[in-house]
Image (cartoon, helix red, strand yellow):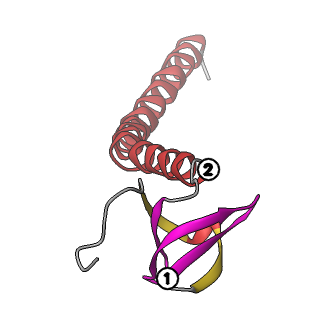
Amino acid sequence: MSNSSILMAMQAAPAEQGSAMAAYANFFIPLIMMFGVFWILVFRPQQRRVKEHQATIAGVKKGDDVITAGGIRGRVTKVADDEVEVEIAQGVKVRVVKSTLTQVAGGGAKPAND
């Protein structure tokens, strides 16, 4: 090979590497952008809801009206570390694990039939 052909081959090699890098960039940049949009629209709101739910459950106190994951409604009569005692009917009390509470409403609302 002559010197000119060697120089031409050396100049062509970086051009091919640059086009390969551009191809990788054109492939990965849209994927990264889609992941970013997905993160903003899905993961962040879900994390916020989980934190709010944990704070609500941690703030349960005696007299709050609650709904369990099983759909049982009742009023909290006693609070322990990881469970609460819920009165679901007159004189009927059940112990429920705090993590199974789905909704907590402040007490004080008088039932319609009393």
Whether residue 74 appears in magenta in the rendering, the answer is yes
Residue beneath label 1, please?
88
Q: Quadrant of the C terminus?
A: bottom left
Labels 1 and 2: the sequence-earlier one: 2
In the rendered image, the residue lying farthest to the left is 112
Of tags 1 and 2, the one toward the viewer is: 1
In the drawing, does residue 109 fall left or right of residue 93? left
Q: Which residue is mark 2?
A: 58
| Disc 2, SS | helix
Q: Position of residue 90 (x, y in %)?
A: 49, 85
Identify whether 100 is placed above or below 46. Answer: below
In depth, the one of 58 and 13 nearer the eye is 58
Would residue 23 appear left or right of 63 to someone viewing this image? left
Q: Residue at x 23, y 74 (%)?
A: 112
Comparing 32 with 10, the one in front is 32
Residue at left offset 62%, top offset 23%: 1
Q: Nearer the viewer, residue 33 or 82?
A: 82
